[in-house]
Amino acid sequence: MRFPSCIVRSFRPTSPEAPPARLSNSLSSSSFASLRRRRRRRRQQSDGITSDVEPAIENSSTTASSTAAAASSGDAGGSSTAASPPPYTPDDPLPKRSDGVMEGPLSKWTNLVHGWQYRWFVLNDETLSYYTSREKMLKRQQRGCIRLLGAAIGIDGENNSLFTITVDDKVFHLQGRDRTERDTWVKALERAIHEKSGYYKPQHEDPVVELSLKVNNAEKQLQNLIEQVRVFEQLYEKTDKSSKRKKGLQEVLNSAQRLQSTVEHSHIMLQQVQRHYVNNEDDKGKDDDEKDGDTAEDEMADIAPAITYSSSEDEFFDAASVDGDDDEDGVNQHVGSTNENEAPGVMNKRIAPSERHSARRAVEPRHSWESTEAEPDWGDANEDFDQIYKNNEESELGDVQQQHGSVLMHLLSQVSVGMDLTKVTLPTFILERRSLLEMYADFFAHPDDFVNGGTMDNPEARIIAVVKYYLSAFYPARKSGVAKKPYNPILGETFRCRWTVPDLENAGKKTQDGPFAGSDVNQVTFVAEQVSHHPPVSAFYAEHPGKRISLNAHIWTKSSFLGLSIGVANVGHAIVTLHDYDEKYTVTFPNGYGRSIMSTPWVELGGRVDVKCEKTGYYAEIDFLTKPFFGGKPHKITGHISKQGLKKPILTLRGEWNGVIHAKTAHGDEHVFVDVKAKPEQPKECEPVAQQSDRESRRLWRHVTAALFRNNINVATNGKRWIEDRQRIEAKRRHETGQKYDPKLFEKVGEEWVYKRALGARTEI
């Protein structure tokens, strides 16, 4: 009987000088320790290991304390501080392939005592085996192996050389010399895992080869379906007509036949596409005279797609959910349905068709390329959308693997580690009920902290006030901790609101211009606009005219798949301006991570951010620390506030960005810098949904929001798809007419997106 390689253990012959199996009770503990040390040194000399301690035997069937701790963390998102440079030498070879096998050196984390250890890894179709050296590999003296069936790959957004393999409730931490070596191993592992488990999208170099594989797979699936339908037909014919079972079988058979027809049509379409690309490949290298006169457009004209799709590089949408129906029932019949958990006592407030344009504010005239298509009847005419938006509590996702396992597997089949998620199909159930533009508005949920900087009489106090506001802004935006994502704003979408500042009376003077004209000058007003789709850039602006303070910002969100988590890099910055002092404070943003996406997702922030004022020389450096590999807590921050020319920081900061942050002065005195949960948030004031323009966030997404609130995923999916399809149509019109989209509220000045009617730039307040 032949055993799998990962079960086979290599046994080391006992040295003649090794201690006997049983020791005399009279042997002292010091003598025993001395014998162990001598034996360990002999082993290291024979193995060529230079470390002072022999690591314990490691394989996927044993459970070391470090492995258990790693598994409890559930992610690769550990702090990069736990990783030291791999103990390689420049002479170590790079990973290489031969006969379907990949091998090369990596560092492996063994446990807290021994840390990173040099290992030689060999990847085959079923396992990733490792040895203490290449020489040991040649002698088949295996140290351990990792099973690939059911394994998952993860990379660290903060460390470019680190990656993990999670399988059998264990996490193996591995590290290459650099990002290139890590990516080489990750791609090879992805391909192997895909062949065994179906996870991850295999990265075929030739798209024609990939298409051929899909066609062959579709044909096999079709044959299986045809056989199943034939079995149903035979069973139906044998069933007595008077039997009650006959009617049930008839319904199942009808559904199966409809499914078979759809699959057959899709298979024919795939074959046509395959022939088109194969012919194009065959035509390569021919002269123009040898090619057919038909154009590619003529060849593809007879292919009628079964679904709507787009290959435009200018799109940035959440794609349709795989768990939603595409039939008419999802739009008309079930749109108005609710579940038994509907909130009682919600006042009904309908937006009648006659109100849809008469209630709009006087805004810029509609562009020629804007669609005038009327919205479908979503069955929610009696909903009070304003009341739904006031209820901002989000439900937990729970265990995604248990509740949405099929959807998760579908998602993993589309992606590879490190892949940009801009165009990946994301399920609707992960969406939270607000646009990304509204999430940015929640950075100002403590408006009194925002305006405090303008009330301080010295530059040191002002930098401290700006940093205090900055650190208190993240919790209101992500306070639930639920790893859901806001709606991706469509191009031209806007959001505006305002806040009343606590303990600051209204001045009785109204603004004539700015983000929210008609507001009191002692209110904080906010406006945001999606100014670009490719890349996806959001710009937002806030001001307090009475205190003469403003903030102008733009953020480009770059999301990527990290295997066990999703990373979002927030590229851009904000500028806080204290107009009375002519001081500008530039602030950057941390990255965001959705961790443990294959179990119970949660959110954390990571990366270094800066706050600096060029005029005064004051600056702050703050590190958002991701959860360490072993032990430790998430959401930690450390940092300092300093001034150029001074050796010691003015304040040293430590704590949690979603809890309490402490500050220590240069003299050693420590105090609470900010407690983000200590005071209530101020509610946003928005115009009623009925009075908003059709591209303002709350009105634009109202049907999707109401459907998610009622847990009607099908309607939410179809409502979102309608918005996105309309945006595609408008993008096509702009392309055909040669028109360029010009943002309404912001303009690009160099690399900045600047609000056109900012405080200090306009003539009227």
Image (cartoon, helix red, strand yellow):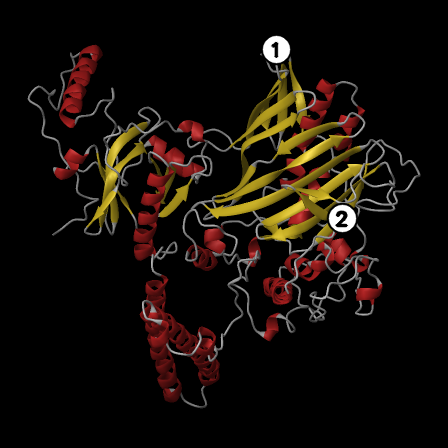
- Residue 461 percent across, percent down from the top left: 73, 20
Depth check, mark 2 against mark 1: the one in front is 2
- Answer yes or no: is residue 140 visible: no
196 to the left or right of 604: left
Location of residue 190 in the rendering, given as x and y in whole percent from the top left corner: 34, 50
The C terminus, quarter of image:
top right
Establish if 631 lies above or below 195: above
Q: Quadrant of residue 752?
A: top right
Q: Residue drawn at (15%, 22%), measured in percent from left and top?
A: 45
Q: Amino acid at mark 2?
A: Arg
In the image, 727: left or right of 90? right
In space, the residues marked 2 and 1 are separated at their CA atoms by 44 Å
Instruction: Tell me whether circle 2 and circle 1 mark residues in contact (CB < 8 Å).
Output: no
Determine which residue is flagged by label 2: 496
Label 1 sits on a secondary structure element that is loop
Residue 98 numbered mark, or none: none
Mark 1 lies on residue: 668
User: Which badge, 2 or 1, is on the more N-terminal residue?
Assistant: 2
Coordinates of residue 656 in the picture (x, y in percent): 59, 29
> What residue lies at 61% left-to-right and 13% top-to-bottom?
645
Residue extending farthest to the top is 667
Residue type marked 1? Gly
